[in-house]
Amino acid sequence: MKALAAIAAVVFALLIAQGCARQSDTQAPKAKPAEHSHGAGPHGGSIAEWGRGKYHIEFTVDHDKQEATVFVLGQDAKTPEPVACEKVLLSIREPRFQVDLAPQPLDGESGGKASRFVGRHEDLGKVQEFAGTITAVVAGTPYAGDFQEQP
């Protein structure tokens, strides 16, 4: 009788465990339709969006120079898109710090517009996968995009 009770307890525990696994599978957060992967950018960096795809931004870092570069790209996430912008603010989550990136126009970019923004901070010398937010005001419109470097 004790053996039968033990078997019943094991079967009951397995059924409960399987039910919990199924329940957690159905309750797992699903990606929002707007979220999608862009892969690596044209400069080998991490891509994020501004304005639901109006612009794409690419984060790159040179650890030896302790320097970050953000490229503003068009809707195709490949073509440079010069914008009129005084600075871009890079906010890193860990270690927590911020750095202003100044415009450094690429060859052929003029009229106060640039698609490349560069800044330095000693914490950029730390070799790690950075994650954070890139914000700016372009033609009076504020933009923000989150990025995450991948190993």
Image (cartoon, rainbow, N blue to C red):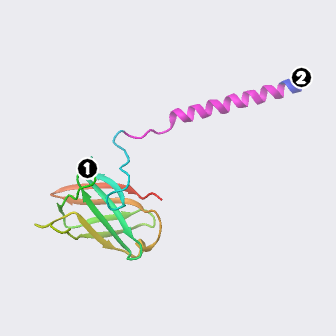
Residue type at the position of mark 1: Asp
Relative to 45, 127 lies left or right: right
Q: Which numbered circle lies on residue 53?
A: none
Q: Which numbered circle lies on residue 76?
A: 1
Label 1: element kind: loop
Query: Which mark sits nearer the N-terminus, 1 or 2?
Result: 2
Magenta part of the chain: 5-32
Query: Which residue matches tag 2?
Result: 1
Determine whether 148 is above or below 2 in the image: below
Residue in the picture at 45% in, 57% down: 150
Q: Position of residue 81 (x, y in %)?
A: 20, 58
Residue in the picture at 88% in, 26% down: 2
Q: Position of residue 9 (x, y in %)?
A: 78, 28
Dot 1 alpha-carbon crowd within 10 angstroms: few under 14, some 14 to 19, many 20 or more = few
In front of the other: 96 or 49: 49
Q: Position of residue 119 (x, y in %)?
A: 31, 72
In front of the other: 60 or 18: 60
In front of the other: 15 or 80: 80
Main SS category, magenta section:
helix
